[in-house]
Image (spheres, helix red, strand yellow):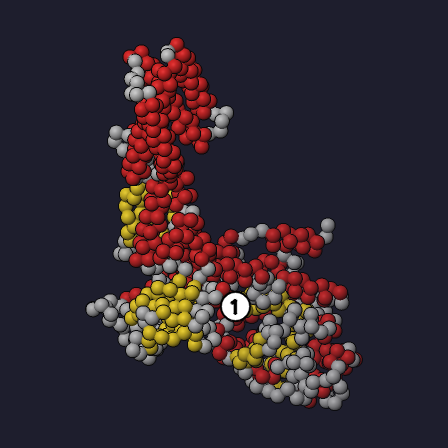
Amino acid sequence: MTAQSSNKSNNTQSTQEIDLMALLGALLDRKYFIAGITALFMLVGIVYAVLSTPVYQATAMIQVEDGSASVPGFDDMAGMFESTSAAVTEIELLKSRSVIGEAVDTLKLDITAEPKLFPFIGNRAYRKFMPTNQGDLAEPSFGASSYAWGGESINIFRFDVPRYAINQEFTLVAQANNSLALLNSDGEQVLTGKVGEELTNGKFNLTVRELNARPGTEFILTRKDRLNTILDLQAAIGASEKGKDSGIINLSLQSSQPNYAEKVLDKVAAIYVRRNVERNSAEAQKSLEFLEVQLPEIKKQLEYAEQRFNDYQIKRQSINITLETQGVLEQVVKLETKLQELNLKRLELGRKFKKNHPAYQGIIEQIQAVEKQRDQLIGEVGSLPKTQQELLRLKRDVEVSNQIYTLLLSKTQELDIVRAGTVGNVRIIDYAEVNTSKPVKPKKALIVVMATMLGAMLSIAIVLIQKAIHKGVEDPSEIEALGIPVYASVPHSEHQDKLTNFIKTRKNKVAKAKRILALDNPADLSIEALRSLRTSLHFAMMEAKNNIIAISGPSPGVGKSFISVNLASVLAQSGKKVLIIDADMRKGYLQTQLGLKWDDGLSDYLSGRLNLAQVTKPTKVEGLSVITRGQIPPNPSELLMHSNFSKLVEEVSATYDIVIIDTPPILAVTDPAIVSAHTGTTLLVARFGQNHLREIELTRDRFDQNGIDVKGLVFNGVLKKASNAYGYYGYYNYEYKSDK
């Protein structure tokens, strides 16, 4: 494996590792951005918490007993109708569409009428208004009299709309003299009239009982779909059993209007309790209805039996029953009465159970046994005289009918008492009540904390994503891992920024300084780094074929011209005779830093229009000369490949101690490769955080393809950042100068 491929492998492995310290440093570098976003979200959270509408919770409590209470003295009768109900079953019954629907219809919850409030702050102003007297209204703010500012109220008794207008919003406008007007969403008038009157146009019906608002105030009126209103209320009402098998049901309802929550919850609980009573008394009611149907028939039978008995006695001239016959009669009547009771019970059980049920079969067996005893007794009557037999039969019919009628009448009265005394197996323990001093929503502190955390997490995520997307090199060790020595790390100079005007282009920033930093502030850390580079170049150029240095870079805006001019100035200040050539004949601007014009430069020499002496210009730095770019030619690469360039290189190499050629970016044009073929040393310039590692690698490969060995790289614009504080502060120069 070659050294280059080994370096690439190590670099790939290092890029796959997660540097936690670097991530922490990246966050510290953007601490002001993170703090700003976090503070912004916290402020939004505070504003939302202050302006949001408070939501209150009404609570109520219901007890579900094991069975319904019985009426004293009628335990045996009430036991027929006792029933047990689990709390879970009762909760489902309580939240059924039947119960909720009745509450919606009774309270007209499918009609909503709300005052129109000013955006954002109107709700808070409406809630905070405390009227001194009943009917007081708050003064409108900002002249917005069509909005409600406090104290406005409306009571809708009826609002019927066609099917197509369900869930549509209508605007009700209060007018003078207790009048009103109803407008649709298009602003067209639908109804008009006075409060208390029934307003109709054949399709729409509206009755407003009360209206307290200044003329011009608007209300939003909506007739909602009944089923959706029921479903929404079902979801809004909370019902849960307090503890396992406790039989205690806690009810809750949240609303921004405390009175609304109390009213709805109380109504639902009341309807539920009433229906529970009706459900528990239903068996007694059904039995009572059955007996009320049977009583007239039994009474007719009794009257008929009495009539036949009296007629027979008159016919036989008041024949009396003997003692023996009387004893048989009493036993037969007793059995007939018992048989009738068993038949009534059989009919009752027949409505509850199937005929093969054990309870039903038991009654049938009892009836059969009693019938057998009765038939045996009647068989004994055959030994009596015929007159006594007939008299016994008629007397038996009278006595049995009388006993049955008395029994049914007694049962009817008992059932009526049981039905009237039924109280159900549920009762309201606590009626609905709201603690208006402690709204359940919003949790202001929680909202502020959550908003702050959201802002912090979002800003941190943005910073980490930007770091992940931005692959600009910030550690010189990554460049050296490619096999390219880093000769110097040049810190970013704030003083240089003052000397520079930034011209924004579509892809980068081109800095055009009008003065030389090495002359204006020779103690700047950037210049100290270039002095270090000067020393490194002294040893690097010992084996070079000539004294010419070509400086290039991967892309525009990396600071090649800054490095070239200031390095040439530092070399000239050390007593060397230095020439700097601007070989970027397309966009070169070395002349701006040296205070010269671009004309009569390199392109003019290469085209043969001027000689070397004519294009070489002195500068204000002693020992430093410059050849500017000259006229912009249509074919810069062809001019560099001309023999005149080779001639130029030979002449200046012999005349000057060091020649620096500033070339364009190698990834943009091929000019640097042509120039570097004539130079002894080639340096690259990469900018901190701007050039990607892959860009630098491609730049080196581009020179390698042309047979040019890149000696090293100058890392320009290095910033002191927390994200790189743990890796390469050794590459960063420290200021060291006199305090005076």
Q: Considering depth in this image, is 507 or 119 the residue closer to the camera?
A: 119
Q: Residue furthest left?
A: 132
Q: Considering depth in this image, is 462 or 504 the residue closer to the camera?
A: 462
Disc 1 marks a residue whose amino acid type is Pro
Q: Residue at x 39, y 55 (%)?
A: 104
- Tell me the crowding category of disc 1: few under 14, some 14 to 19, or many 20 or more residues within 10 angstroms, Cα based: many
From this view, report whether residue 444 is shown above or below residue 246.
Answer: below
In the rendered picture of this protein, how many numbered marks are placed on residues?
1
Q: In which quadrant will I find the C terminus? A: bottom left
Residue 9 lies, in percent from the top left, at 67, 52
Q: Is residue 479 found left or right of 731 in the rendered image?
A: right
From this view, report whether residue 151 is shown above or below residue 505.
Answer: above
Q: Residue at x 34, y 41 (%)?
A: 277
* Residue 447 visible to the viewer: no
From this view, report whether residue 448 is shown above or below residue 200.
Answer: above
Q: Residue at x 31, y 54 (%)?
A: 262
Q: Residue furthest right?
A: 643
* Residue 375 visible to the viewer: yes
Which of the 4 quarters of the picture holds residue 34?
Answer: bottom left
Q: Residue at x 33, y 44 (%)?
A: 273
Q: Considering depth in this image, is 674 or 371 the residue closer to the camera?
A: 371
Q: Considering depth in this image, is 693 or 560 the residue closer to the camera?
A: 693
Residue 436 lies, in percent from the top left, at 28, 56
Q: Which residue is mark 1?
A: 491
Q: Secondary structure at mark 1?
A: strand
Which of the 4 quarters of the picture holds residue 470?
Answer: bottom right
Residue 455 lies, in percent from the top left, at 44, 60
Residue 734 lies, in percent from the top left, at 47, 65
Q: Is residue 38 found left or right of 68 in the rendered image?
A: right
